[in-house]
């Protein structure tokens, strides 16, 4: 294949280079995957307003997310098992994001640890927190994020229980991978991936193994994670976290106006309109369809961001036009990582930036900070 021109090109290349169980992990949703598909498809229903004979010089995508300057209103979303798309994946993606000038968000369920990522970056990154029953472990994670200099904590609110993802169950997904004939075949047909994995020691959940009580290997980790997601998680826990973190706080997983108002009541700096990439409640509305309602519900009480379904710079522009102050890309950067490593993440960011820049110009705007609903010709939401 010649140099990828689109996120879809990166996806096709990643499919050929990443073992099926890990590619499917990134490229799947819960149950029928209807919400996963809607996240992407619903952007197409928003039509842009073409403008002509306007000054298109000196354009800028520079913006801010929670007071932090960004090269464009895009952050890399927290994604689990990133280091299984490519060896040392979180470290490579964090470096690419830093060099480009956008935030990188490290998942609690990452392969590379907080300390690993801190060792290869020079600027603060963000850390995403899953709230477990073991509150002592959560406190230690918060302290580790502080020590690493993380500049924002992203609390995921929509994973109190795990949605069922059929592909993962059928594939027997695990990290490190199990050595069954099926898994050995999947890896043997991806020699470049195997070579990279052979050169790194990072094959398990780096933030958990050796840090959580009595979790020292794969079997103890499996038992621990199965019982640790907390179905009793409530808004009072956000206050508990906020008190211990004492820094910029973002709440991820808001898809309802009532929940959005509750998020604003916590005093958090931002909320992320998100349905976990269609990986939790199948049949829930797409993120982009709920964005205008949530923006209206909270006004200027809290910054509103969006996650889910973005596959192009046009999608980012549409989200900004509908009120998002920032957006997140998960699968697009994972496809780039799986396809080409750090270079692929850089390429994914450049693809989105170029598409956003050209689209903004053709809509008659020169500065992303001035983009609003006036660039929309039709929106069904």
Image (spheres, rainbow, N blue to C red):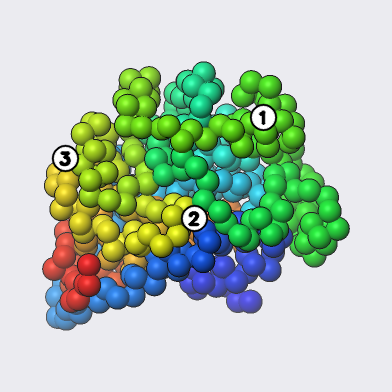
The residue wearing badge 2 is 279
The quadrant in which the C terminus is found is: bottom left
Q: Secondary structure at mark 3?
A: loop
Crowding around mark 2 (Cα neighbors within 10 Å: few <14, some 14 to 19, many 20+) is many
Q: Report the mark closest to the observer, 1 or 2.
A: 2
Q: Report the mark closest to the observer, 2 or 3.
A: 2
Q: Is residue 338 left or right of residue 40?
A: right
Residue 156 appears in the figure = yes
Crowding around mark 3 (Cα neighbors within 10 Å: few <14, some 14 to 19, many 20+) is some
Q: Quadrant of residue 1?
A: bottom right
> In the current view of this chain or complex, which residue is farthest to the front?
232
| Mark number, residue 301 | 3
The residue wearing badge 1 is 209
Q: Give the mark nearest the N terminus, 1 or 2.
A: 1
Q: Secondary structure at mark 1?
A: loop
Q: CA distance from mark 3 to mark 1?
A: 39 Å
Q: Give the mark nearest the N terminus, 3 or 1.
A: 1
Q: Is residue 278 left or right of residue 355?
A: right
Q: Residue at x 14, y 44 (%)?
A: 300
């Amino acid at each position: 294949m010649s140099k990828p021109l689109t996120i879809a090109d990166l996806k096709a290349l990643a499919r050929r280079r990443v073992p099926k169980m890990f590619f499917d992990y990134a490229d799947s949703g819960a149950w029928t995957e209807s919400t996963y598909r809607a996240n992407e498809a619903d952007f197409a229903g928003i039509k842009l307003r073409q403008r002509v004979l306007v000054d298109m010089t000196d354009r800028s995508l520079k913006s801010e997310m929670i007071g932090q300057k960004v090269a464009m209103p895009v952050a890399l979303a927290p994604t689990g098992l990133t280091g299984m798309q490519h060896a040392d994946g979180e470290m490579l993606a964090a470096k690419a994001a830093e060099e480009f000038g956008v935030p990188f968000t490290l998942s609690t369920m990452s392969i590379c640890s907080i300390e690993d990522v801190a060792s290869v970056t020079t600027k603060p990154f963000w850390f995403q927190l899953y709230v477990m029953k073991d509150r002592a472990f959560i406190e230690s994670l918060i302290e580790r994020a502080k020590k690493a200099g993380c500049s924002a904590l992203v609390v995921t609110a929509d994973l109190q229980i795990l949605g069922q993802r059929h592909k993962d169950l059928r594939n027997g997904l695990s990290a490190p991978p199990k050595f069954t004939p099926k898994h050995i075949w999947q890896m043997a047909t991806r020699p470049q991936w195997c070579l990279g994995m052979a050169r790194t020691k990072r094959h398990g959940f780096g933030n958990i193994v050796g840090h959580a009580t009595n979790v020292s290997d794969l079997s103890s980790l499996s038992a621990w994670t199965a019982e640790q997601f907390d179905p009793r998680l409530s808004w009072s826990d956000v206050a508990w976290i906020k008190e211990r973190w004492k820094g910029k706080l973002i709440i991820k997983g808001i898809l309802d106006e009532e929940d959005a108002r509750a998020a604003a009541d916590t005093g958090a700096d931002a909320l992320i309109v998100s349905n976990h990439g269609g990986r939790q409640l199948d049949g829930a509305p797409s993120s982009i369809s709920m964005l205008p309602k949530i923006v209206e519900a909270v006004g200027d009480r809290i910054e509103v961001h969006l996650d889910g379904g973005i596959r192009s710079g046009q999608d980012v522009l549409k989200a900004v036009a509908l009120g998002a102050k920032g957006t997140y890309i998960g699968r697009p950067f994972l496809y780039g990582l799986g396809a080409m490593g750090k270079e692929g993440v850089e390429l994914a960011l450049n693809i989105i930036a170029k598409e956003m820049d050209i689209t903004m110009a053709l809509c008659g705007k020169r500065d992303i900070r001035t983009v609003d609903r006036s660039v929309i010709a039709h929106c069904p939401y």
